Amino acid sequence: MEKPLNISRKSFLKLIACGGVATVGGVGCSQSKSVTKENRSSEDLFVCQNFTERGSFTSGVEGPAVDTSGNLYAVNYARQHTIGKVTPDGRASVFVELEKGSIGNGIRFSSNGNMLIADYTNHNVLKVEMETREVSVYAHQPKMNQPNDIAIGADDKVYASDPNWSKSTGQLWRIDTDGQTTLLERDMGTTNGIEVGIDEKTLYVGESVQRKVWAYDLSRAGKISNKRLLIEFPDHGLDGMRCDTAGNLYITRYGKGTVAVVTPKGEISREVTIAAGKNPSNLAFGGPDGRTVYVTVADVGNVQRFRTDTPGRSWKLLNDMN
């Protein structure tokens, strides 16, 4: 096993996070799946509120994902090494405790309902059988720096960002359904947030230190090509990202305290100010209609939420399959 890096992701993000909080906001409450345009216009959209108590998660809170029953999961609830579960009404508890020095980061659900977790300390992607809560190694790759965030396609191929925070570099990996790993690109910037586009033909990857988001063409075989810059931010950091069903990317702006909504053309259509704190680390779509955005916030140690006007891609994908 490789030795841990001499600087942590959290420590490095603190170094690059700086000043200012924008002033656009967002959230709300649950609605039924039959939401009309009139309902949407009367909703309090893009107004962020606290969902769990401050300090309920550690400063390592990350990797939110929502199951088909509407439960939210995120890493490091109450203490490191845990996966926390938060019910739709906000009741939080430890779902599983990871063993052997594992610490989770990104979480996604596969089409069969299994939870997949990026285990950055042990160079793994872990699998959790939801009914038994049994944890096993789905993929292991010692050449990974520290698998950070993960994305998943409709075909269950997993894509992992792999930063080296001390060197401000990173890699990009694919993990196939048999657990085999393939290095897609090396010598990148500090790879972090990652997402598959709504068309299943695009892969988005963010570089936190460089403040860039790249788009790649993604083939059916999981190969990437035609790399191009989607957007470069002038300040602050960026962390996790998710795509909605209209193809927009919701990107957490670490240090700025906002979630930027970026169009497929790379334009910022709005920024949503979080309810408290400046360091949103990641987000996920949930709620009964897929239009509740849950945001993990590192410096507050909680989950916040806001309502949006468009469902999330991964929410729709998971619910359509089950």
Image: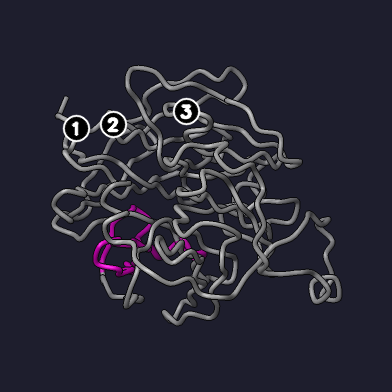
Q: Amino acid at mark 1?
A: Pro
Q: Are marks 2 and 1 in contact (CB under 8 Å)?
A: yes
Q: Secondary structure at mark 1?
A: loop
| Residue sitting farthest toward the front | 19
Q: Secondary structure at mark 2?
A: loop
Residue 230 on the magenta span: no
Tell whether 165 sits left or right of 297: left
* Quarter of image, res 211: bottom left
Residue 312: x and y, percent? 60, 59
Q: Amino acid at mark 3?
A: Arg
Colour scheme used in the picture?
one colour
The one nearer the camera, 84 or 289, is: 84
Identify residue for label 1: 4
Query: In whole angstroms, how far apart are the C-alphas of marks 2 and 1?
Result: 7 Å
The one nearer the camera, 250 or 45, is: 45
| On screen, residue 254 above or below 143 | below
Q: Secondary structure at mark 3?
A: loop
**Residue placed at 53% from the left, 45% from the top?**
64
User: What are the residue bounds of the magenta stretch?
Assistant: 197-225
Residue 106: x and y, percent? 43, 43
Identify residue for label 3: 79
What mark, if any, has residue 121 been given in the picture? Answer: 2
Q: Amino acid at mark 2?
A: Thr
Tell whether 225 sits left or right of 85: left
| On screen, residue 288 above or below 249 | above
Residue 267: x and y, percent? 45, 82
The quarter in which the N terminus is drawn is: top left
Q: Are marks 3 and 2 in contact (CB under 8 Å)?
A: no
Residue 220 on the magenta span: yes
**Residue placed at 20% from the left, 41% from the top?**
145
How packed mark 2 is, by other alpha carbons closer than 10 Å (few <14, some 14-19, many 20 or more), is many
Q: Earlier in the sequence, mark 1 or mark 3?
A: 1
